[in-house]
Amino acid sequence: FFGLVNEAIALGSRASKMMKIEIIAPLHEYEKSMIISEAIRLKVPLELTWSCHRRDDIACGKCTACVSRLQSFRAVGMEDPIEYLPMM
């Protein structure tokens, strides 16, 4: 996908050889649990990260992004540091 997007950018832009526009996504092949493990190693403040697609105040815990995030934190043996809506 990213290769095709980069080709489209190159074909559709007036970028010169001096200024190449390119999308670089170094983590796109990683599973979320691998990204979380790397973030822990790098001491990334995970309490400042966000995944929820439904809300921007308290994570819903039910959308696909929240479910994936929660599963990934469990996979590395860590509790997600952000707040979620209470499960009912």
Image: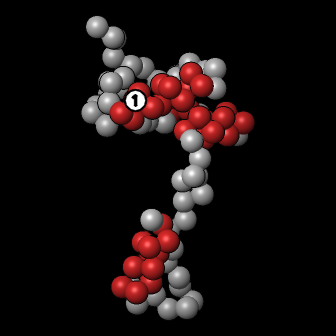
| Rendering quarter of residue 76 | top right
Viewer-proximal residue, 50 or 66? Answer: 66
Instruction: Identify the residue at horizontal 67%, vertical 40% (top origin).
Output: 38
| Left or right: residue 76 compared with residue 64 | right
| Left or right: residue 42 compared with residue 33 | right
Instruction: Identify the residue at horizontal 54%, vertical 53% (top origin).
Output: 28
Q: Position of residue 83 (x, y in %)?
A: 42, 20
Inspect this view and state whether residue 59 appears. yes
> Extreme right residue here?
41
Specify the amino acid type for callout 1.
Answer: Cys
Instruction: Identify the residue at horizontal 47%, vertical 31% (top origin).
Output: 69
Viewer-proximal residue, 16 or 36? Answer: 36
Name the image quarter holding the C terminus: top left
Q: What residue sits right under mark 1 in the picture? A: 66
| Left or right: residue 84 compared with residue 18 | left
Instruction: Identify the residue at horizontal 53%, vertical 82% (top origin).
Output: 20
